[in-house]
Every structure is written in C-alpha cells, then in structure tokens.
Amino acid sequence: MKKREIKVAAYGGLAVLTAGVAFGGSDPAPTTVDLETVGASFRVLSEGTIGRGDVTLDSVEFDDGRRWNKFIHASKITEFDTQGSLPGGVKITTGPDTTGNAGPSSLEGMDGDSSSISDADHDLFADRILAAYKDDNLNHFFDTNSKAGSFSYVVEFEKEVRDNDSGPDNVGEILWFERGGNGSNSWIVFEAVDELGRVVGNTVLVSPQHDAHTEPRAYGATLRDDLSYKSYQAMTAVAVDVSSLGVSSFKRLRVRSAMNGYDGFSTSMMQSGQDVNADFKLMVIQTYDISMPAWALGD
C-alpha cells in the first residue's frame, strides 16, 4: 500500500476533506481484491452546530486535478437482512438539525413491536436506508453498533454507475464515508450484482487502512438507544474505483459485513472489543452526461 501525506485546505465556508482512493485489479470472481490508495480531496459544505447540522458533499477532486460534482443516488434498497446479535444496534442516524427526509430510526420496532426483529421490520427499515442514501448529506447514514451481528443489502441506483476508465485509475467512483473510522474497526464488503442478486465480478474488502481522518474534519452524529442526540465523531472518506469490482459498470451494489474467515478478513485484524461493522454513507460519482466537464469547474 502506498503511504501518502494527507494535505488539507479550506475555502471560506468549505471544508476540504483529504482522504484516499482505493482501486484494484480485475481478478476473476470470487477473488477479494487488495486495494491500493491514491490521493483525493472531498469538499463539503457544513452548516449548523458540529455534529448536529448538514454536512453536504460538494465535489471530489483527484490527483489528476479533475473535480467531479455530479452524483448518482440510490433508487431502491432490496434484500436487506441481518443476522446474529443486532437488537438495538442497527439504526439510521441523522443530526437533529439536518434537513431532508432521513429522520433517525431503529430496526427493531419498525412494525410496532420492539421485542423482536421481524420480516416487516426489515422491509420497513429498507425504506429508511433509502431515505438516508437519496441525498448528499453525510450526516444521514446507516449505523451499526454490534460486535457479533452482520448485515447485507443491495443498493439499486437511479442510473448506471460507469467507470470513467476501463482499467485501474486514480478516479474512484464509489464513495464511502465512515463515521469514526481510521482505526482497526469498520470493515465492509462491496460486490456488483445482477438483477437476480448474483455476484458479477470481484468481492472487494474495504478496510480502515484505506480511509483517513480529515483536518478540518466533517462530523457525523452519534445517538443514544432512544435515538436522541448524544455526541459526534469525525467522518473519514474512501473512494473505490469501479474496476476494482471486475466490471466497467453496474446498476446494483451489494453492501455487507465482512465475515470472519471470508473475504480476506479475520477478526484478528481488529483490536479487542471493536465493532467490525461500519457506520457509513454510500454515494457514487456520475461520470457521463455531464453538461460541463466537472474538472473544468473553478472554485
């Protein structure tokens, strides 16, 4: 893995988040791809009190100087499932003063009965994941708080996600923003899937090694079990090149927990007591049908 100096700048009310881009080769499925990092800067607009207000992604700039500011949002969440010890540990977190329709919610009790997690809970909660992923606000995100359980769901996007280059390059179209990353916790797996949910390409394991803290930092909220605001943590950022998945484009992306003994992951990679599951926002860059070249835009 390349080691890079993390550089940070600020433009008035804009905080520039500098982090890593992850990309890999095109090994055949089901090989887990080892990712390598190159430089990128994520520019955000922050409004309101730290951790409580909006943190909106404005643009992403890569080492080649090109800046991208058009994003593709989720249109559907399917196949949402959880396994193991997750009661009280899966929620949608939002800052209490954020705008938009992604209000906080917990998995259990979505059907009106908080004593267990039902199929109805999963179906209803999928709509809450979608609400959090339909905007550019990094303070709306999927939140897991479990050391034993696992989750999986498929994100279907409103339009095709396309690689800007057919091979590995320094533009990462898949954007992963993690609250409280940059340690040995918070691992995640990405897989492009077809309309039947079959993997088409590689399994990509994204680890905490690939993200970087930002300074000045963007912050995401933390909530108590009753969904009231508790505090905040810094958001870290990673961008993954589409070619890492072994495809040149996709419409559906499976997002799931890393499983011990699979995907190149072992719990021995983590410090004792840490959560394997991530707390994250998922976005993707649109690389086509852009009226004005994104990299030609000025500040």
Image (cartoon, rainbow, N blue to C red):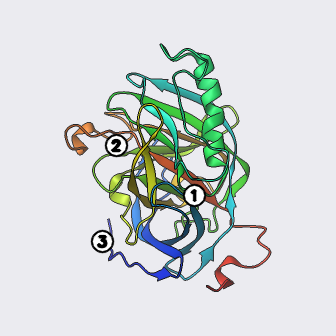
Type of amino acid at the residue the image marks with label 3: Lys
Q: Which numbered disc covers residue 3?
A: 3
Residue at the spot 67% in from the left edge and 39% down from the top edge: 194
Q: Nearer the viewer, residue 52 or 171?
A: 52
Q: Among all residues in the image, which is located at the extreme left?
A: 272
Name the side, left or right, on which 291 lies relative to 284: right
Label 1: which secondary element: helix
Q: Which residue is mark 1?
A: 242
Residue 244 picture location, percent across and down = 51, 56
Q: How many marks?
A: 3
Image quarter where the N terminus lies is bottom left
> Spatial distance from mark 2 to mark 1, Cα to Cα?
19 Å
Query: Could you classify mark 3 by the number of other residues whose Cα lies within 10 Å: few (under 14), some (14-19), or many (20 or more)?
Result: few
Image-quadrant location for residue 276:
top left
Label 2: which secondary element: loop
Q: Which residue is mark 2?
A: 264
> Spatial distance from mark 3 to mark 2, Cα to Cα?
21 Å
Type of amino acid at the residue the image marks with label 1: Val
Name the side, left or right, on which 184 lies relative to 125: left
Residue at the spot 46% in from the left edge and 40% down from the top edge: 143
> Spatial distance from mark 3 to mark 1, Cα to Cα?
22 Å
